[in-house]
Image (cartoon, helix red, strand yellow):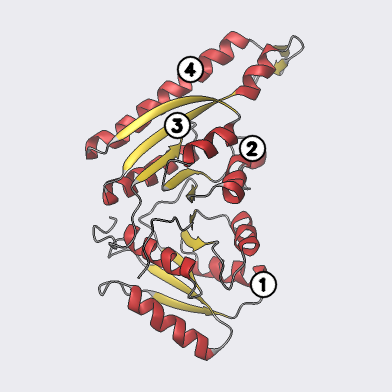
Amino acid sequence: MISKNAPESFSFKRITVALDCSSHSKASLNAATEIARTLNAELSGIYVEDINLVRMAALPFAEEIQRISARQQPVDSTRIEQSLRRQSRLAGEMLREAAEPFRIRCSFKTLRGQVAAEVLAAALSSDLLVLGRTGKTPVCRKSLGTTAKTMLTSCKTSVLLMRQGFSLQGPVLVLFDGSEGSVLALLTATAIAGQSTRMHILLVANSPEKTATLKEKAESILPPLIRPSFHEIPWTGIPMLLQCIRMIDSGLLVASDTAGTLSRETIHELIEKLDYPVLLIRKNSGDALP
């Protein structure tokens, strides 16, 4: 279970989860619910009706291929609208079923428009945005989805990119270089990790002296009952980072793209190439650091 002893200096108060009824979406909802339950946060679910799909269905020459017969037939715009309403209803039901047992304050809203733009706008009123890291189509299942990429580069709030097969109860890995962003990432990891959850801290240092300094700083931040495993990495590039993270095989990666040893561009490239869930911490003006 997630620890109830969240640091007083940092907390998510408002969490938005983007739902589309996919397996990645369900994993996202489970993670968002777990965090909301622990931090007593409000949970807001959104479902976006893709306006591009609606417009395509209205075109007179639009056709679709039947799954079984492989025959082409005109797109039925009425059926598309019904399908969107059904998915919206199911998404709302998913949210309520997840939140009600824990009495989590929740709300649900159906939006229509460009998916990435609507999700981005919804995130403005939240401290944390949660969504699946991959798309629904077969082409996108092994790479970062279009909406996830937009949130990675354009969203100003913290983002959790979740994927099927992982949970917050598994091992957690924190990228730590001593910067303000990495301190906040470590604080967040301790807030969402239970005492029984194994925590790994990857120290990004280029000398034994820097490694010792980073380890001492990290230990001063951690609650007494958390005993992490420390790993040292001399910063040499994306391939080395990927290799180390995959060898640790921790599960959830917690990092920040706020200025530090690792540039914003490096963190984003790492997230795109790494097939793990990632919690990317962005510092808000109201966040207090020790």
- Amino acid type, label 2: Pro
> Do tag 1 and tag 3 residues touch (Cβ < 8 Å)?
no
SS label for mark 3: strand
Looking at marks 2 and 3 on the same chain, the residue that comes earlier in the sequence is marked by: 3
- The residue tagged 2 is 138
Pointer 1 or 2: first along the chain: 2
Residue 235: % across, % down: 61, 77
- Name the residue: 39% across, 83% down: 216
Which comes sooner in the sequence, label 1 or label 3? 3
Q: Amino acid at mark 4?
A: Arg
| Earlier-in-chain disc, 3 versus 4 | 3
Q: Residue at x 26, y 75 (%)?
A: 224
| Mark 1 residue type | Gly
- Which disc number belongs to residue 274? none
Identify the mark nearer the N-term, 4 or 2. 4
Q: Nearer the viewer, mark 2 or mark 3?
A: 3
**Number of the front mark, 1 or 2:** 1
Residue 46 is labelled as 3
Secondary element under disc 1, as helix, strand or loop, is: loop
Residue indicated by mark 1: 237
Side of 270 where 254 appears, left or right? left
Tag 4 secondary structure: helix
